[in-house]
């Protein structure tokens, strides 16, 4: 049977779909991933070349070299003007229809919420929220990106940082617990746009005990699944939606 038709059928018969996504979901909106040949880690910038990309997005860099951290962060992590793509919008529609119970994302760009998704577990945090490291006061995405200070500060004197899980930091407990709970109760788990190489996030799929496990990824994954489609996730969902509209 045609793979698109099979995915369509899985979605139609399911009531607790969970989507587990990675960088490949947002690259179709123009957001670079991290590890591909055109990814963030391979964008050679003379200004930052004395540092490893992992260090530039680490807790150590934030504490030891905050000017460097915020300069890199402002240059590379601003997605405020990026728009959701077919994948983000289709997942939001599935949630509105009562089919999808949650999105679990490794991305930090906030595009799922921008597309209309409500239940999103951001297991690596988000650039859309910031907070003061001293008093905890919360700030929106504009605060850091629009600040004229090299190191953005709160009126209390504390540094205002992004609510992103940096290297050397623990994943947000509430998001992790929500993700695991959603995956363990799902009847259909769709994994999309991820290499499943980033741990511990990639390990959460082992909690899935539902009916069908689906992978939509440009590159094949070494994973036992019911259905694997090696293609653009946005194009796959566009084709599924076309089938739905023909009914």
Image (cartoon, helix red, strand yellow):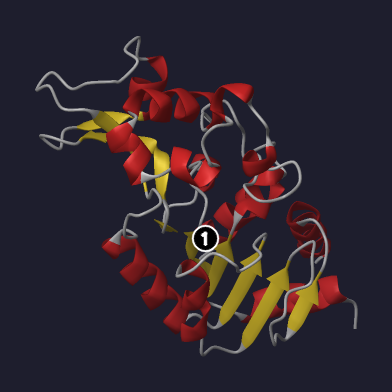
Q: Position of residue 221 (x, y in %)?
A: 73, 74
Please state the total of marks drawn on the protein image: 1
- Tell me, yes or no, if residue 60 can be seen here: yes
Please identify the quarter of the rendering in which residue 240 is found: bottom right
Residue found at x 70% / y 85%: 225
Q: Is residue 98 above or below residue 37?
A: below
The answer to whether residue 226 is above or below residue 65 is below
Which quadrant would the C terminus be assigned to in this image?
Answer: bottom right
Q: Nearer the viewer, residue 18 or 220?
A: 220
Rendered view: 159 above or below 21: above
Tell me residue 238's x, y (percent): 78, 54
Q: Residues within 10 Å of mark 1 (few under 14, many from 20)?
A: many
Q: Is residue 123 left or right of residue 41?
A: left
Q: Mark 1 falls on what kind of element?
A: helix
Q: Is residue 16 visible?
A: no
Report x, y in % for residue 70. Answer: 40, 26
Q: Nearer the viewer, residue 197 or 48?
A: 48
Identify which residue is drawn at 83% across, 70% down: 4
Q: Is residue 185 left or right of residue 37?
A: left
Residue 49: x percent and y percent? 59, 31
Q: Is residue 208 left or right of residue 124?
A: right
Q: Residue at x 58, y 61 (%)?
A: 21
């Amino acid at each position: 049977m045609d793979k698109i038709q099979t995915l369509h059928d899985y979605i139609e018969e399911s009531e607790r779909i969970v989507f587990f996504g990675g960088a490949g979901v947002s690259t179709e909106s123009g957001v670079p991933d991290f590890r591909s040949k055109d990814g963030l880690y391979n964008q050679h910038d003379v200004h930052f070349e004395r540092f490893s990309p992992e260090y530039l997005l680490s807790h150590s860099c934030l504490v030891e070299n905050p000017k460097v951290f915020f300069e890199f962060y402002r240059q590379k992590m601003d997605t405020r003007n990026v728009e959701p793509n077919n994948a983000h919008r289709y997942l939001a529609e599935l949630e509105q229809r009562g089919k999808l119970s949650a999105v679990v994302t490794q991305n930090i760009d906030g595009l799922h919420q921008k597309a209309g998704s409500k239940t999103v577990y951001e297991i690596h945090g988000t650039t859309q929220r910031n907070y003061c490291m001293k008093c905890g006061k919360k700030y929106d995405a504009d605060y850091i990106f629009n600040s004229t200070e090299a190191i953005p500060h709160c009126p209390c004197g504390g540094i205002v940082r992004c609510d992103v899980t940096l290297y050397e930091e623990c994943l947000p407990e509430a998001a992790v617990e929500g993700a695991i709970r959603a995956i363990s109760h799902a009847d259909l788990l769709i994994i999309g746009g991820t290499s499943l190489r980033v741990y511990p996030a990639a390990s959460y799929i082992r909690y899935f005990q539902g009916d069908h496990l689906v992978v939509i990824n440009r590159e094949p994954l070494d994973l036992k699944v019911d259905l694997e489609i090696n293609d653009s996730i946005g194009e796959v969902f566009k084709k599924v939606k076309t089938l739905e509209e023909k009914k």
